[in-house]
Image (spheres, rainbow, N blue to C red):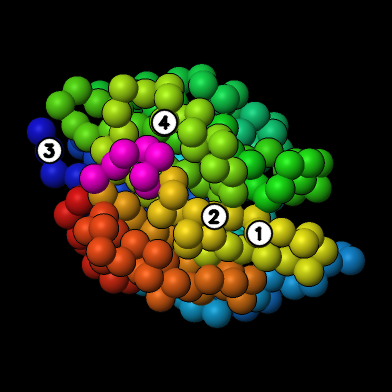
Amino acid sequence: MSTTTLTWIGGPTAVLEYAGLRIVTDPTFDPPGNYVESGEPPLVKTAGPGIPRSDLGPVDLVLLSHHEHEDNLDYEGLELLATGVPTLSTMKAAGDLFGGGVIGLDNWETHEIGDVTVTAVPALHGPPGSEARLGPVIGFVLEAPGEPTVYVSGDNASLPLVEQIAGAFDRIDIAVLFAGAARVPQIDAQLTLTSEDAATAARTLGVSRVVGLHTSDWEHFSEGPEQLAAAFEGTGLLVDCPRGQRVEL
């Protein structure tokens, strides 16, 4: 068994070292700034990456939960994809993004790279019915012989979908949960897990370790690391991952 580690870069972005692969989640490496779309309030980024893309080192795989919002794929992230690194994402992302190696997966479809099998699992970015406005999203489950099974939620806000995922696998050992209870003015609901939802998801999955991503660096994340830590207080599940530091899981 190799050592599984995670280095948090910022927002939803981390480097996961797993079964001999270096895997990046939802790549965001831009400096702080505003992202403005016509007719919509801007998304405001408040902190830059713990490690710049230029210092990232080799990347074997990108797990991109979706491509339509800059807090999950920014300009520097697009530059990373343009290098041709294999990228697993939604079928829509595979159709929309050009010049890279984006592979679109349907829910429950698998992809093998090295010794790792990646299964695309369902996610819902917001309340039921929000797909038409916010677009499709997927999560991922990573499996490899002799290694822990890892769930990466992506921008999922649905606990019923977490229950489906828990029932589809013999075990899940580590959960990388996108929390932060993201909210935007035009939708009266959270778009990612709340801190309490993340704790419920961890219990549902039966995991022994949790990493919380997507809790800081953007103004529309309504719950931060403090709320997430409070939700997991006394459980011993939540792993402290300081920005830019490699942490063994």
Q: Which residue is mark 1?
A: 190
Q: Label 4 amino acid?
A: Ala
Residue 135, which numbered label?
A: none
Magenta region includes residue 207: yes
Residue segment shown in magenta: 202-208
Q: How many marks?
A: 4
Say if mark 2 contacts mark 3, CB within 8 Å. no
Q: Nearer the viewer, residue 207 or 218?
A: 207
Say if mark 1 contacts mark 2, CB within 8 Å. yes
Horizontal placement of 159 versus 14: left or right?
A: right
Task: Identify which residue is drawn at 49% across, 33% down.
Answer: 163
Q: Label 3 amino acid?
A: Ser
Q: CA distance from mark 3 to mark 4?
A: 24 Å
Q: CA distance from mark 1 to mark 3?
A: 37 Å
Say if mark 3 contacts mark 4, CB within 8 Å. no
Q: Which residue is mark 3?
A: 2
User: Residue 169 location, x and y as percent?
Assistant: 37, 23
Q: Which residue is mark 4?
A: 166
Q: What kind of element bears circle 3?
A: loop
Q: Earlier in the sequence, mark 3 or mark 4?
A: 3
Q: Nearer the viewer, residue 75 or 244?
A: 244
Q: What kind of element bears circle 1?
A: loop
User: Residue 22 location, x and y as percent?
Assistant: 29, 44
User: Residue 88 location, x and y as percent?
Assistant: 50, 34
